[in-house]
Image: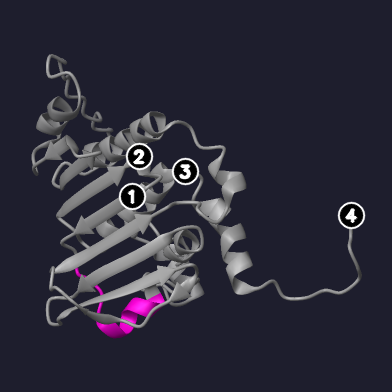
Amino acid sequence: CIRDSIISLLPEHVANQIAAGEVVQRPSSVVKELLENSLDAGAKQIDIVIEQGGNQLIQVRDNGMGIKKDQLPNALKRFHTSKLSNLNDLFAIDTLGFRGEALASIASVAQVSIVSNDKESEGSEINVVDGSLSDAIPAPKIDGTQITIKDLFYNTPARKKFLKTPRTEARKIIETVKRFGLSCPDLGISLITDGKKIIDLMPETLEDRIGSLFDNTLSLIHISEPTRPY
């Protein structure tokens, strides 16, 4: 029902939590968004750590181009992106993400820490705790970006109760990582779940990647598109 006739602007944190529902359905959604960001940053190695099916911890570290200190706050703001700047860019998108919503949405329903640096700058760290964005502080230089997500959905218990068991959520994350690994055989990627290394892939050919991810007794048949006559 309509409470009254006053039309007002939603508080930013409420708008972000609502928007998060479109981006973050479960821990595997978070992993997907972070992996896409890493690939868009040109990463050649991505290392993932999760605990309790991603409910307690999701950490993704890459060796991509990194983020400068003065740009770190923008990484956590809605509709802030380096992937497009005008409407015409939408017709030439060559990145996996472009709307600039993922990190802001995640930060509205979890505790987030980002450590990053580009090749020319020192390391910096920024944190979001209970919706409050900290100032950027000095951090170790890692030549890439590390994003740590803790206590997913801690402030939206109605959504958290719909998550499956940690084991089921971990399995969904494993499936997500495998899909990325299969689509990017030249990418090194690892996944540690509750202290156990589940996936550890080095850059390889597509044929070798299929063998690494699936039953290596599979018989592969090369199919090429026939040449069409003029």
The amino acid marked with disc number 3 is Arg
| Residue 40 in sight here | no
Marking on residue 1: 4
> Of circles 2 and 4, which is in front?
2
Choose the circle earlier in sequence order: 2 or 1: 2
In this view of the protein, which residue sits in the foreground, 138 or 99? 138
In this view of the protein, which residue sits in the foreground, 93 or 195? 195
In the image: residue 208, left or right of residue 38: left
Residue stretch rendered in magenta on the structure: 65-74
> Of circles 2 and 3, which is in front?
2
Q: Quadrant of residue 205?
A: top left
Marking on residue 26: 3
Please give the residue where the numbered disc 1 appears in the rendered image. Answer: 57
SS class, disc 2: helix
- Quarter containing the N terminus: bottom right
Choose the circle earlier in sequence order: 4 or 3: 4
Quick one: label 3, few (<14), some, or many (20+) residues within 10 Å? many
Distance in Å between CA atoms under marks 2 and 4 = 39 Å
Choose the circle earlier in sequence order: 1 or 3: 3
Choose the circle earlier in sequence order: 2 or 3: 3
SS class, disc 4: loop
Distance in Å between CA atoms under marks 2 and 1 = 7 Å
Contact flag, marks 1 and 3 (Cβ < 8 Å): no
Please give the residue where the numbered disc 2 appears in the rendered image. Answer: 52
> Of circles 1 and 3, which is in front?
1
The amino acid marked with disc number 2 is Gln
Question: Residue sitting at 51 percent across and 63 percent down?
Answer: 108
Q: Position of residue 117 (x, y in %)?
A: 19, 75
Marking on residue 230: none
Distance in Å between CA atoms under marks 4 and 1 = 38 Å
